[in-house]
Image (spheres, rainbow, N blue to C red):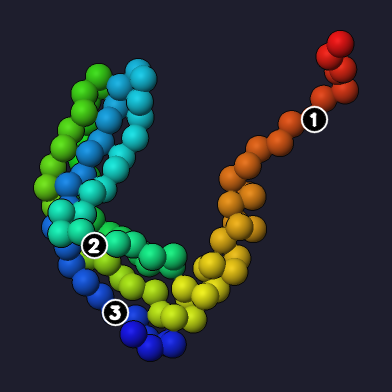
């Protein structure tokens, strides 16, 4: 992998989608042990996985992994903490608890 070039990889994966009262999530587990690094992109092939309310659906798919170049990895590591702060929600109130 070069400083400016990207590599592509395919990997078998399991997609789990939960649409329950207690949990609403989607997870991808790579079945070949592939590891995702900062800046990498993952696109799961196939139609969307739809879970009816109250169910958890698991399907095996193929994922296309676009590996970030070394420069993109370095940039992602340097700026990742700043982007994380955009996800945080802060609230300030004038009430004082005694």
Q: Residues within 10 Å of mark 1 (few under 14, many from 20)?
A: few
Q: Which residue is mark 1?
A: 92
Res. 46 visible in picture: no
Q: How far across and down, in percent of the image, does residue 92 sit?
A: 80, 30
Q: Are marks 3 and 2 in contact (CB under 8 Å)?
A: no
* Mark 3 and mark 1: Cα distance apart in space: 45 Å
Quadrant of residue 59 within the rendered picture? top left
Q: Specify which label sits upstream in the sequence, 3 or 1.
A: 3
Name the foreground residue: 77 vs 42: 77
Name the foreground residue: 63 vs 31: 31
* Residue at left offset 86%, top offset 18%: 95
Q: How far across and down, in percent of the image, does residue 74 sit?
A: 52, 75
* Mark 3 and mark 2: Cα distance apart in space: 14 Å
Quadrant of residue 24 within the rendered picture? top left
Q: Residues within 10 Å of mark 3 (few under 14, many from 20)?
A: few
Secondary structure of residue under mark 2: loop
Relative side of 72 to 95, left or right:
left
* Residue at left offset 87%, top offset 17%: 96
Q: Which residue is mark 3?
A: 7
């Amino acid at each position: 992998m070069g400083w400016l070039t990207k590599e592509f990889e395919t990997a078998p994966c399991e997609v789990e989608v939960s649409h329950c009262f207690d949990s609403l999530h989607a997870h991808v587990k790579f079945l070949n042990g592939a590891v995702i690094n900062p800046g990498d992109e993952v696109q799961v092939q196939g139609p969307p996985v739809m879970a009816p309310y109250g169910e958890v659906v698991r399907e095996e798919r193929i994922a296309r992994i676009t590996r970030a170049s070394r420069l993109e990895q370095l940039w992602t590591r340097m700026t990742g903490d700043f982007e994380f702060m955009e996800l945080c929600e802060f609230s300030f109130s004038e009430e004082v608890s005694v």
